[in-house]
Image (cartoon, helix red, strand yellow):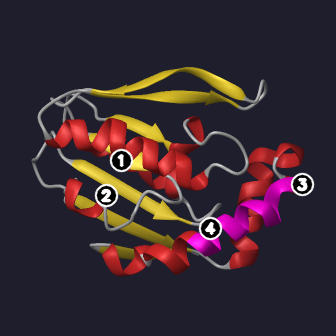
């Protein structure tokens, strides 16, 4: 828990390309967090479909991070991938920690709203293998489409430069 110290209400943003290890790192961090456990919000639950990297990140910034910075609870619409439509909500109470993980979340608008920002790197072949092992045939036809959005995010926002911590995973 050295990453956030004893700030049990801290906000942590974990960004990186698909398959870089964001979900694994967020689970490990959440397991080490003091009680009460933090809310873990994967952007995969928010992105509005295969072309929604920017829209998902912008919704989390607007509806979760900004309200929390004002001492208010956040709430964002979720996404049902099987039905390809909005579904339910994810909540982020202001009085407990928050870990947001997903490509697109680390940008100039979000970094000042977080206590800790992380960029994860991993070799391209490793990332692809991890992502396709995890999501299989549901992801395979969209890999290039999604990677193009990741490229655009990195080009426009330079998330690595905004990160407090840059990790390269094997």
Reply yes or no: does residue 97 show up in magenta. no
Spot occupied by residue 103 in the image (x, y as percentages of width and height): 53, 59
| Callouts 2 and 1 close, C-beta under 8 Å | yes
Return the residue found at the far top: 88
Residue shown at 13%/55% (left/top)?
5
The quadrant in which the C terminus is found is: bottom right
Reply yes or no: does residue 149 show up in magenta. yes
Indicate which disc, 1 or 4, sits on the residue closer to the N terminus.
1
Spot occupied by residue 153 in the image (x, y as percentages of width and height): 54, 69
Residue shown at 11%/33% (left/top)?
71
- Label 1 Cα neighbours within 10 Å, binned few <14 / some 14-19 / many ≥20: many
- Label 2 Cα neighbours within 10 Å, binned few <14 / some 14-19 / many ≥20: many
- Label 4 Cα neighbours within 10 Å, binned few <14 / some 14-19 / many ≥20: some
Residue shown at 31%/61% (left/top)?
109
Kindly identify which residue carries mark 2: 110
Badge 1 element: helix
What's the CA distance linking mark 2 and mark 1? 6 Å
**Residue 51, above or below 98:** below
Kindly identify which residue carries mark 3: 141
Prevailing secondary structure of the magenta residues: helix
Indicate which disc, 3 or 2, sits on the residue closer to the N terminus.
2
Indicate which disc, 3 or 4, sits on the residue closer to the N terminus.
3
What's the CA distance linking mark 3 and mark 4? 16 Å
Kindly identify which residue carries mark 1: 61
Indicate which disc, 4 or 2, sits on the residue closer to the N terminus.
2
What's the CA distance linking mark 1 and mark 3? 28 Å
- Label 3 Cα neighbours within 10 Å, binned few <14 / some 14-19 / many ≥20: few
Q: Is residue 84 left or right of residue 6?
A: right
Residue shown at 60%/20% (left/top)?
87
Kindly identify which residue carries mark 4: 150
Which residues are the magenta region?
141-152
């Amino acid at each position: 828990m050295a990453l956030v110290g004893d700030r049990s209400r801290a906000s942590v943003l974990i960004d990186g390309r698909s398959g870089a290890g964001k979900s694994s790192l967020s689970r490990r961090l959440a397991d080490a967090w003091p009680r009460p456990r933090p809310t873990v919000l994967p952007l995969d639950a928010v992105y509005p479909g295969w072309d929604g990297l920017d829209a998902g990140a912008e919704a989390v910034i607007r509806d979760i991070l900004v309200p929390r910075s004002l001492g208010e609870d956040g709430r964002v619409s979720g996404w049902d991938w099987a039905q390809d439509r909005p579904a339910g909500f994810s909540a982020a109470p202001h009085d407990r920690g928050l870990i947001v993980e997903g490509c697109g979340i680390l940008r100039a608008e979000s970094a000042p709203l977080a206590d800790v920002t992380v960029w994860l790197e991993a070799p391209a072949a490793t990332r692809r293998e991890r992502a396709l092992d995890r999501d299989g045939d549901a992801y395979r036809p969209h890999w290039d489409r999604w990677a193009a959005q990741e490229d655009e995010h990195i080009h426009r926002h330079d998330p690595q430069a905004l990160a407090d911590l840059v990790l390269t995973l094997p």
